[in-house]
Image: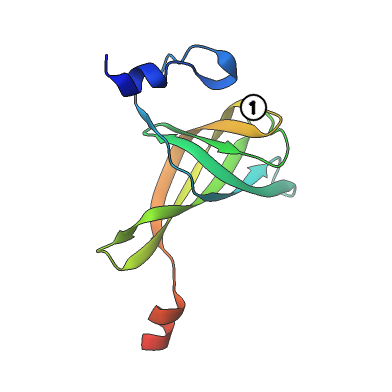
Amino acid sequence: MSESTHQESAGFGGLSDRRGTSRFPVREDVRYTVVHSRALKTSGTGKTLNFGSGGLLFTTEDRLPVGRTVELSVTWPALLEGKCPLQFVATGRVVRSENNRAAVKIERYEFRTRGTASAAAAT
């Protein structure tokens, strides 16, 4: 087992981490919306704590309800072709939650381009 795997073995809430995929420590801005019903949604902001191929751990303003659908938008740290800023947009379900952080299992995702002031000025 690699050193990074050992470091990730202490999981969320002090429980052992039983994931089969690696997590990567990524600290970026996240906006989230919890879907309670078609008419009722709760939004907030936070910071990502780590990312994996199947999920995301991030800070929250309030405790999120386990099992609810969450829409996420994360400022992606890499640029498309070294020039264009990206946004990671995903939908998933809250699988674990504490007072100030939540883990979401990602069900769908896509990358979107983000406009920049310099790109707008060039057109």
Q: Which residue is mark 1?
A: 97
Q: Residue 5 is drawn in which quadrant? A: top left
- Quick one: 84 or 6, which is closer to the camera? 6
x, y percent for residue 120 = 43, 82
- In the picture shown, does residue 19 fall above or below 64? above
Mark 1: give few (<14), some (14-19) or many (20+) Cα within 10 Å: many
The N terminus - image quarter: top left
Residue 8 % position (x, y): 42, 21
Instruction: Please name the residue shown 48% across and 44% down the image.
Output: 27
Left or right, 113 with respect to 94, comes to left
- Dot 1 falls on a residue whose secondary structure is strand
Residue displayed at 36% across by 87% down: 122
Q: Does the rendering let one see residue 29? A: yes
Q: Is residue 20 visible?
A: no
Is 72 in front, or is 18?
18
Looking at the rendered image, the quarter that the C terminus falls into is bottom left
- Residue 79 found in image quarter: bottom left
Residue at the left extreme, as displayed: 81
Establish if 87 lies above or below 59. below
Residue type at tag 1 = Ser
Tell whether 75 sits left or right of 3: right
Place of residue 45 in the rendered image (x, y in percent of width and height, measured from the top left): 64, 49
Q: How is the image coloured?
A: rainbow
Looking at the rendered structure, the number of numbered marks drawn on it comes to: 1
Q: Position of residue 63 (x, y in %)?
A: 71, 33
